[in-house]
Structures are given as C-alpha cells and as structure tokens.
Image (cartoon, rainbow, N blue to C red):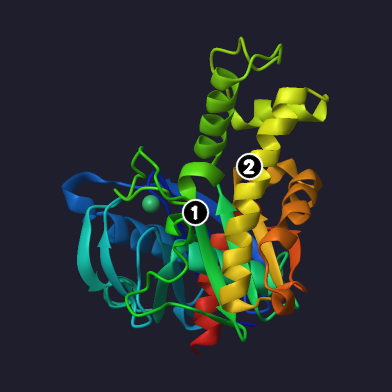
Amino acid sequence: MKYGFGVDLGGTTVKIAWFDEAGTLLQKWEIPTDLSDRGKNILPDIARSILAFLGENNIPKGDVLGVGIGVPGPVDKDNVVNRCENLKWGVFDVAQAITDLTGFPAKAGNDATVAALGEYWKGGGAAYENMILVTLGTGVGGGIILGGKPVYGTTGAAGEIGHMVLKRGETLPCGCGKFGCAEQYCSATGIVRTAKEYLQTHNTDSVLSGSEKLTCKAVFDAAGNGDEAALKILEIVYDDLAMLVANLCNTLDPQIVLFGGGVSKAGNVLLEGVGKHLPKYIFHACAHAKLGLATLGNDAGAYGAFKLILDNL
Ligand code: ZN
C-alpha cells in the first residue's frame, strides 16, 4: 500500500491529511499559516511538518506517492500560482517548491477547485462526472468538474463564480472591486445584508428586527420558526441563488450542483428553496440538473489535494 498527503492551505491554518492510495483519510492535523515576510515560511513549514510526521511514524519515503496542495488563489494547470493576495505570494511554481523542499512529487490547484475534486471523489458529487461545487461562506467560491476533471481555465481562475455578475446598478462594491457580484447577495455576509435591507424597508414585528448582531443562521432559524419576514428574506436569497445556479447550468450543463460552506448547513430547506425558483432561469435542456449538499465539510480540500496526486501519477 502506498500513501500520500493532501494539504489544504488557508489564510489562518494549514490542514494536512495523510491518506492511503484508496482514499482513506488516516490522520489529519493543522499548523498555523505564517503570513509574515510575504508568506515565504509557509511552504517550508508544511515541508517540515510532513517530514516530521514521516520520521515520527517510521514511514519510509518510498511509500509516499506525493504531496497535493490546494492554494487560496488562482493556480494554473502547470502548478503556477498567479498572485495570491491572502498569502502575499507572487507568481511561482508551487509544486516545484514543495518538491525542492521534500523530495516528493507535488501538484497544486486552486483551493475551491480542489475541494470540488474532493467532493467528486469521495463526497456529495461521487458518481457525477459533471458537477459544480458552490461554496457559500463569508464569500462565494466554486469549483467545476467536467468529465471527471477539474476545469482550470487559462490562468487557473475558472470557477470564480462568486464574481459572476447577478445585478446591474449595484452601488456597493464587491471585495473584488466590481459591482453586483453573486458574492454580494449569496454569501453569508450577503444574506445578512439582504435581511438588513428588507427589515429597514418593511414594517414588521420580526424577531430579527431588534437583533443587534444579525447572523445568517439567525435568519434561517427565524424562518424555521415561521417568522414571516425571515421567510420573505429567504425567498429573495433563494431567487438570487437560483439565478446563479441557472447561469452555471446553462453554461456548463452539469449533472449536479452541490452547495458547500457554512450556509449549506441550512440543508434541505436551502435545496428546496433554490429549486423552487430555478425554473424561471434554467434552460430546458439543462433542467435535469440535481441540487445536492457537499458532504466532506472542511476535509474536502484535503481529499481533493491528494486526488490531484493520484490523477497525475
Ligand atoms: Zn466580485
């Protein structure tokens, strides 16, 4: 049996997982992401942690197939990261850097694309070779798998679906500097904003009205308890999400669209809510697409990162 590492590199922590070649996650741990000095310690820290793990467990280097890594920025098919603002990285070959540090074969991808690969391999997208993962967290991210392969695009920026434009005339800027991006309405932050705007412009006795620190979860909870304003707010959110999903389906014709990230914890009500609004926007020949939930949670990135290695042996 051979083994390998799947690494999910985030802005605050690095998740490192140890897999066997069948894809069983055997062990996982985290180390902090050192953002000092333009992130130049990050990869050496990862290499040190990996080599220490092998040493402590007396694992021969010959048993290691390689190190796959998901990076929070655009990474092209040749492992070159194209400026990663979160980590203050420039342009370089991430896989080559890891190989230089560890001696193992390495492969790098964008973290959201890699998470989609993980869900395709072992999660909610298993058995669907054409699938899209839509991650609804503080932002909106995504990954596209077509024919069982991740789609990278020219610079590795394919799947930046949070910046698909949903609205004209938006006056507030998105984090990316543009106006009207899906992320502004469909992220947890965007849902809270929609809720605040609704409450400000409607006279309601909603439980949300007096809330000082309104959260996305509070909106879903209130709706679950039958709060009328919360239900109306979620209809707006589901409509926005349905437009995003339909635009994706009309372009890529996937078998399934999975929701992941914190907002997806709402579960089936989210799928039903979005599903109800989809027919308004979806092209008839793409309307077969199913909606589903990601199942690997925070481990999706590690699974996908290791799969990059298996796919490139
Ligand atoms: Zn944007």
Q: Quadrant of the N terminus?
A: bottom right
Place residue 89 in its image quadrant: bottom left
Q: CA distance from mark 2 to mark 1?
A: 12 Å
Q: Along the horizontal axis of the image, is 47 left or right of 199?
A: left
Place residue 191 in its image quadrant: top right
Q: Which residue is mark 1?
A: 166
Few, some or many C-alpha atoms within 10 Å of disc 1 (few <14, some 14-19, many ≥20)?
some
Q: Nearer the viewer, residue 209 or 18?
A: 209
Mark 2: secondary structure: helix
Q: Residue furthest toward the left? A: 37
Q: Which percent across, then down, holds residue 107?
A: 41, 77
Which amino acid is tagged 1?
Answer: Leu
Q: Which percent across, then down, holds residue 68?
A: 46, 72
Tell me which residue sits at (74%, 31%) in the image. 231
Q: Which residue is mark 2?
A: 237
Q: Is residue 247 visible?
A: yes
